[in-house]
Amino acid sequence: MQSDTQIHKNIRITGKVQGVGFRYHAQHTASTFGIKGFVRNLTGGEVYIEAEGSPSKVDSFIAWCRQGPSRARVDHLDITEGLVVGFREFLIK
């Protein structure tokens, strides 16, 4: 029995989130929290993240996503549940 339940969240972030180092800061922050998954830019100017980890760590990571790096302006997060994939690391795509 696994004592540390893993969850998966799909996060779409809108605002001024491209060209401000969002993906690189997200990767660093995810590593700090032990989050696995990936981050990528979307063609509409949003950033998309899939994040896996313990519920408390994912919640902490989402709290960071609501602010982002200093040059970003986060207007909205759209968060949905996903199935745990079992990512091994956090990548920038």
Image (tube, rainbow, N blue to C red):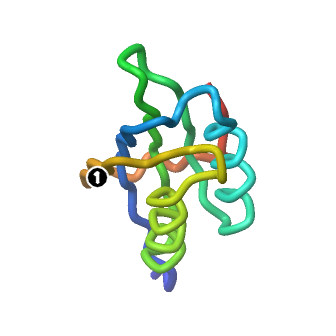
Residue 53 sits above or below residue 76 on the image:
below
Horizontal and vertical percent position of residue 80: 25, 51
Instruction: Determine the secondary structure under disc 1.
Output: strand
Picture quadrant where residue 19 is located:
top right
Q: Quadrant of the C terminus?
A: top right
Seen in the image, is 61 located left or right of residue 23? left
Horizontal and vertical percent position of residue 34: 67, 65
Q: Residue at x 28, y 52 (%)?
A: 79
Of 76 and 53, nearer the camera is: 76
Type of amino acid at the residue the image marks with label 1 = Ile
Horizontal and vertical percent position of residue 22: 62, 40
Which residue has dot 1 on it?
79
Seen in the image, is 11 located left or right of residue 27? left
Q: Quadrant of the N terminus?
A: bottom left
Horizontal and vertical percent position of residue 86: 52, 50
Q: Residue at x 36, y 38 (%)?
A: 14
Q: Residue at x 51, y 25 (%)?
A: 41
Identity of the residue furthest to the bottom in this view: 3
Question: Which class describes the residues within 10 Å of circle 1: few (<14), some (14-19), or many (20+)?
Answer: some
